[in-house]
Amino acid sequence: MGETAGYWGLFLHAHLPFVRHPEYEYFLEEHWLFEALAECYLPLLRRSHLLLEDGVPFNFTMSLTPTLASMLADELLMNRFSGYLARTIELSEKEIQRTQHQPEHNRLARYYLDRLTVKRRFFEDKLGSDVLSGFRSLADSGRVEIVTCGATHGFLPLLACHRPSVRAQIEVAVTTHRRLLGRDPVGIMLPECAYHQGLEEVLAANNLRFFIMDSHGLLYSRPRSLFGVFAPVYTRNGVAAFARDHESSKQVWSSKEGYPGDTAYRDFYRDAGFDLDMDYIKPYVSPDGIRTFTGIKYHRITGETDHKELYEPETAMSRVRDHAANFVFNRERQAEHLARLMGKPPIILSPYDAELFGHWWFEGPDFLEHVFRRMADSVVRPVTLAQYLEENPTHQVATPCASSWGDKGYYEVWLNGTNDWIWRYLHHAAIRMSDRATRYVTADPLRRRMLNQMARELLLAQSSDWPFIMTMGTSVEYAERRLKLHLDRFNQLDGILEEGWDEETLKEMEDKDNIFPDIDYRVYAE
C-alpha cells in the first residue's frame, strides 16, 4: 500500500423509533425491529467480526440511537425476536417441502434455510442473544467508533424554541449511551442531520467532539468552507462538523443510479408473504390477516417490469465484487484529484442509514465487506471520525448553515401541512415540563416517579419519526396514535401531580414505556 492519498469515513446511522407493546402478544410495528435485526444488524455484526478475525484493517463510525439501543437491551423484545427467527426458519423448512418439484425455487429455499440457521447460531451462540455485546466488542477492538444521537431522535431545530428540550435530548442520549455501551460517546449523528446555529453549545457541554451534517451545511457556512465537504470545520467552541460527500453517497444509496438498483440484485418487494396463498402463509404474517414481509424472496430486480426473473445468489455476489472494486477505484481517483487541489489528503464522508445494508439492499453487507478487503491495499484509508481528528487536529473555524438531509435540504419534511398541527402541543407540553421540573426540584418518591414518567412520555412524543411518517404517508395512523398516546399520558400525570396518584396505574405506564430507567426529570429544569 502506498502513501495515503485520502481518508474514507463510512458512517452508518442505525435508528428505529421505540416500538414496544407488552400489552399485545403480537404487534405489527415491532417487526420493524425484527426485520432490521435479521437482515441488517446481525449481518453487519457478523461480517465485521469476520474482518476482525482475518486481520483486515477496516474502520468505520456508526450511531446506535438511544431508542434502538434500548430495544436491543430489552429482554421482552429479544425473546420475541428469537420467536420471529424460529418462525422464519420454520417457514423456510416448509418452503423446501413446498418447492420440492421446482428445482430453482427449492435451491433458493435451501439457501434461505442455511442463511437463517447461521444467523440464529451467530445470535444465540456467538452473541449469547445479546446484540449490544457484539457492538461493544467492536468498539473495544478500536475498529468501530459507536456514537450517539438524540434521545428519541427529536428534530432539534424545531424543538429549539424551548432550549431545555434540546438539552434533554442530548443529555439523556449521552447517559443512555454510557449505560448501555459502557463508554461516553465522542460524537453524535444529529437526528436527520438537522443543524441550527447554537446547537454546538449543547454538544460541547456534553463533551461531544463532532457531529454529522448534510453537504450544504458546510458549503454555505460562514465563512465558506475552504475545502468544501472534504475537511471538517470547527465551530466557535471547538466542536467539529463533518459533511456528507454527495458523490460517494449517491453511488450507494440511489436505487436508480446506484449499485442497489442492479438487475441482478434481489428484489425487495417480491416476498412470499404477499405471493403465496393466505391459508398457507397465515402463520407467518400478522394474525389479523394483514400480509407482511417474511424475508423469503425468490426474485431479482430484473428491470422496470412486472415480470421478475428468479434470484441467482452467485450472479449477485459476482456483481457485489465488481461494484466493490468500482467503489474503491472511484474513491482512489476522487481522493488523488482532491489531494492535488487541497494540498493535503481529503476525508470523503459517506453516511448512510444502516438499514440500507441488508434490509433494503440485500447484498449490502457483502458489499461493505468486499470494499474493506480491497481498501486494505488502497491509497485510501478507512478511518473513524475520532481517529481522523486525532491525526488531523488543525481545521478552519466556521459557522455551519441551517440544514438537514430531508427533501429540499432544510426542515420542510418535519413541518408541513401534514404534520404542522403537532408542534403546538409538543411545545406546550415542553413548557409545562420545565415549569414542573423547576417547581419540584425536590420531590417525594411517588411524585418523582410521576415527573420522570412525564419526561419519558414527552421525549417519546418528540420523536422525529412521527412527523416524518405523516409526511411520507406510511403508517400514518400508527404515528398519530403514538404521538397522542404519549401526550395523553403526559397530560394525565400533569393533571394530578399535585394530588398524588394511583401507584398501580403509574406502574402500568412505567412498564409500557420503560425506556430511560435512569432519567432525571430535572434535566428539563430552567
Image: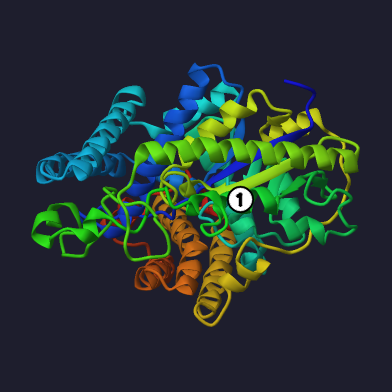
Amino acid carrying label 1: it is Gln
Front-lying residue, 512 or 75 = 75
Query: Left or right: 378 with respect to 228?
Result: left
Q: Position of residue 211 (x, y in %)?
A: 69, 47
**The C terminus sits in image quarter:** bottom right
Front-lying residue, 36 or 297 = 297
Which residue is painted at 70% across and 33% down in the image?
Answer: 386
Q: Position of residue 398 (x, y in %)?
A: 86, 53
**The N terminus sits in image quarter:** top right
Q: Residue furthest bottom?
A: 417
User: To which quarter of the image does residue 493 belong?
Assistant: bottom left
**Can residue 484 be seen by looking at this rendering?**
no
What residue is shown with label 1? 251
**Can residue 275 be seen by looking at this rendering?**
yes
Q: Give the image's coloring scheme.
A: rainbow
Query: Left or right: 369 with respect to 438?
Result: left
Above or below for 331 versus 391: below
Which residue is painted at 83% across and 42% down in the image?
Answer: 338
User: To which quarter of the image does residue 3 belong?
Assistant: top right
